[in-house]
Image: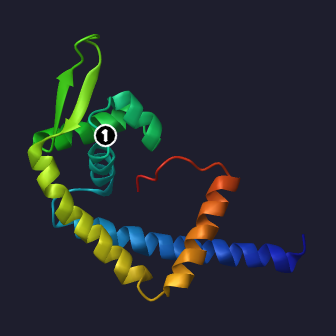
């Protein structure tokens, strides 16, 4: 690989990091108005797509330690957005699910996410968005990046 090619990749990585940091930073600041964090949002979104799950499954899917998941679960439970119940078959297992309050708060947070996406990607045409997404998916598939980013 030539020096010119290596420099090109470093420039590409720099631009990708720059945009990613700005997009995620803006989203994090917007969520602060709802007194929540990006990791909390990710857990809420994940729970909204299923009836219930365990902290262990969340830990694997979100690539977080069990301790990290535990802190997020505690915060969400304190806000009344999720509930934890002991599994009927195995009392060592906690089952997590959204509460009605959690379900009610999700649409306003989804709106914040949509507004953030529009703010940063609205300048792209529909065709450009399709190409961009296709390229990101190709990179993700090639490198077997399967887990959802938390921050």
Whether residue 31 is situated above or below residue 72 in the rendered picture: below
Q: Residue at x 90, y 75 (%)?
A: 2
Whether residue 121 is situated above or below residue 46 in the rendered picture: below
Q: Is residue 87 visible?
A: yes
Q: Is residue 79 visible?
A: no
Q: Residue at x 56, y 83 (%)?
A: 128
Residue 76 % position (x, y): 18, 43
Q: Quadrant of the C terminus?
A: bottom left
Crowdedness near tag 1: few (<14), some (14–19) or many (≥20) residues, C-alpha within 10 Å = few
Q: Is residue 56 left or right of residue 9?
A: left
Whether residue 14 is situated above or below residue 149 in the rendered picture: below
Q: Nearer the viewer, residue 134 or 28?
A: 134
SS for dot 1: loop
Q: Residue at x 73, y 73 (%)?
A: 9
Q: Quadrant of the N terminus?
A: bottom right
Q: Is residue 115 left or right of residue 20?
A: left
Residue 83 % position (x, y): 16, 34
Report the label total: 1
| Residue furthest right as drawn | 2
Residue 33 % position (x, y): 16, 67
Q: Is residue 22 left or right of residue 75?
A: right
Q: How is the image coloured?
A: rainbow
Residue 117 % position (x, y): 37, 75
Q: Nearer the viewer, residue 134 or 84?
A: 134
Whether residue 97 is situated above or below residue 115 in the rendered picture: above
Which residue in the protein does label 1 denote?
50
């Amino acid at each position: 690989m030539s020096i010119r090619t290596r420099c090109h990749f470093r420039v590409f990585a720099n631009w990708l990091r720059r945009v990613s940091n700005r997009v995620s930073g803006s989203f994090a600041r917007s969520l602060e108005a709802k007194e929540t964090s990006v990791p909390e949002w990710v857990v809420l979104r994940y729970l909204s797509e299923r009836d219930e799950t365990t902290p262990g499954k969340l830990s694997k899917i979100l690539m977080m330690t069990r301790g990290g998941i535990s802190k997020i679960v505690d915060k969400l439970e304190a806000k009344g957005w999720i509930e934890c119940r002991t599994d009927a078959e195995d009392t060592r297992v906690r089952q997590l699910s959204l509460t009605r309050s959690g379900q009610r708060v999700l649409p306003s947070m989804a709106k914040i996410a949509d507004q953030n996406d529009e703010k940063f990607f609205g300048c792209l045409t529909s065709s450009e968005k399709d190409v961009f997404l296709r390229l990101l998916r190709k990179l993700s598939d090639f490198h077997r990046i399967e887990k959802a980013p938390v921050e």
